Image: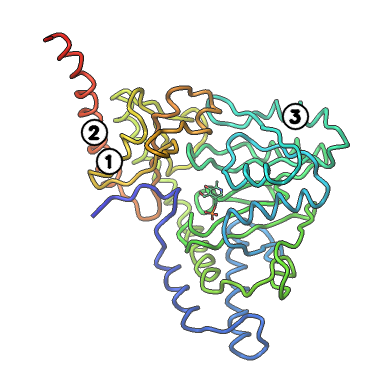
Amino acid sequence: MSIYLDHNATTPVRPEACAAVARALAMGGNPSSVHAAGRAARALVEHARDEVAALVAAPASTVVFTSGGTEANALALESAVAAGARRLVVSALEHDSVQETARAAGVAVEVLPVTADGVADLAWLAERLGRWDAADGRPFVAMMLANNETGVIQPVAQAAGIVRAADGWLHVDAVQAGGKIAIDSRALGADTLSVSAHKLGGPQGVGALTFGPRATLSRRQHGGGQERGRRGGTENVPGICGFGAAATAALGDLESFQRLADGRDALAARMKAAGAVVMGEGAPRLANTLCVATPEFTSDLQVMGLDLAGVLVSAGAACSSGKVKASPVLTAMGQGELAACAIRVSGGWNTDDGDWNRLAEAWLEAHGRHAARRRQPAALGVQA
Ligand code: PLP
């Protein structure tokens, strides 16, 4: 059996979510139908909406279900542009769903830099918003709550103070933070905030955006008026029910989730002793995430070596056509060559100490083999 330590990519579905999906599928009914079956389906959707609202401490009436985190981010950014934003400030840490939507929005995009520890630079933000040109419309800032690669938790509440002082709109991608730390969207000062079911033990293909009173959401999809007219189309009832059940289960597990840091840190200590460097170690991080780089041991070699040993993690760098592309996040952190030598290890609700240990053993073995191979040509050279 393989060891799955890639929960930030997608988390195995929790049994509570599986059961809720199966119940909804068995029940059937269209939430827009006025008859009994429709009313029952509507009740399921609204119950799930309450559960997702509780996850982020938002009023249920402000939760819009979407097809995932990507669409929730797009809804926020496109709404801001429709409301008049002409320049979007996007942190260098943001997920492609934010970066690419911003680039495709037809307005100016500016990158908010990050520190070497992977924390958004608030001094830069304050200075930039302090000289905002009114011709650019209301300032719009996208800053995620926790980074998918490093797990670094961002100073969103402080950023919100800066954005609010400039009468701006702060969008918070909380896709990786949802179910991993307590989130109070209002206390954070988020004007819009996105979450995704499959990052916390729900099914893939369902997410949500919540919005505060200072955000005006536009219509994402025309159609039958579902989601209070914001997103037409028959709701993904099974997915939404699975999302709600996963959100409730994750909220209940928040305390035990923090204990993942023990196994994660024990693993990090063993890797560091072999020369690895932990990314964002000096900043507050999600308890489940370890982004660790090893000089001259590229990400793809590490991921493949671990895969052969039955341990599944992800590259902190993107691989395409056999070439390693350094992670833009780690590059933005100024990590240079190390950015192409990182892996991301992420545990979750079903991870135990044995999993971290198995990874440590497999990684140390792969690292030892790699180091021996690197020594070989030099040794041959001496013989020749
Ligand atoms: N935002 C972040 C930070 C993510 O890590 C991801 C997924 O990897 C997304 C957004 C996209 O979410 P989804 O896969 O639900 O579209």
Q: Position of residue 120 (x, y in %)?
A: 62, 32
Which quadrant holds the C terminus? top left
Q: Are marks 2 and 3 in contact (CB under 8 Å)?
A: no
Quarter of the view holding residue 91: top right
Whether 89 is drawn above or below 331: the answer is: below
For label 1, count other residues whose C-alpha is less than 10 Å away and answer few (under 14), some (14-19) or many (20+): many
Instruction: Please state which amino acid type lies under the numbered disc 1.
Output: Leu
Instruction: Please state which amino acid type lies under the numbered disc 3.
Output: Ala
Circle 3: element type: helix
Residue 126: assigned label: 3
Which residue is label 2 attached to? 366
Q: Are marks 3 and 1 in contact (CB under 8 Å)?
A: no
Query: Sequence order check: which comes first, mark 2 or mark 3?
Result: 3
Which quadrant holds the N terminus? bottom left
Instruction: Please state which amino acid type lies under the numbered disc 2.
Output: Ala
Distance CA(mark 1)–CA(mark 2): 7 Å
Circle 1: element type: helix
Ligand 1 lies under 8 Å from the Cβ of mark 2: no
Query: Which of the two residues, 45 or 91, is positioned nearer the viewer here?
Result: 91
Quarter of the view holding residue 380: top left
Give the residue at x 52% y 69%: 239
Q: Position of residue 216 (x, y in %)?
A: 79, 56
Which residue is label 1 attached to? 306
Distance CA(mark 2)–CA(mark 3): 45 Å
Whether 379 is drawn above or below 272: the answer is: above
Q: Position of residue 227 (x, y in %)?
A: 69, 69
Query: Sequence order check: which comes first, mark 1 or mark 2?
Result: 1
Q: Are marks 1 and 2 in contact (CB under 8 Å)?
A: yes
Distance CA(mark 3)–CA(mark 1): 43 Å
Circle 2: element type: helix
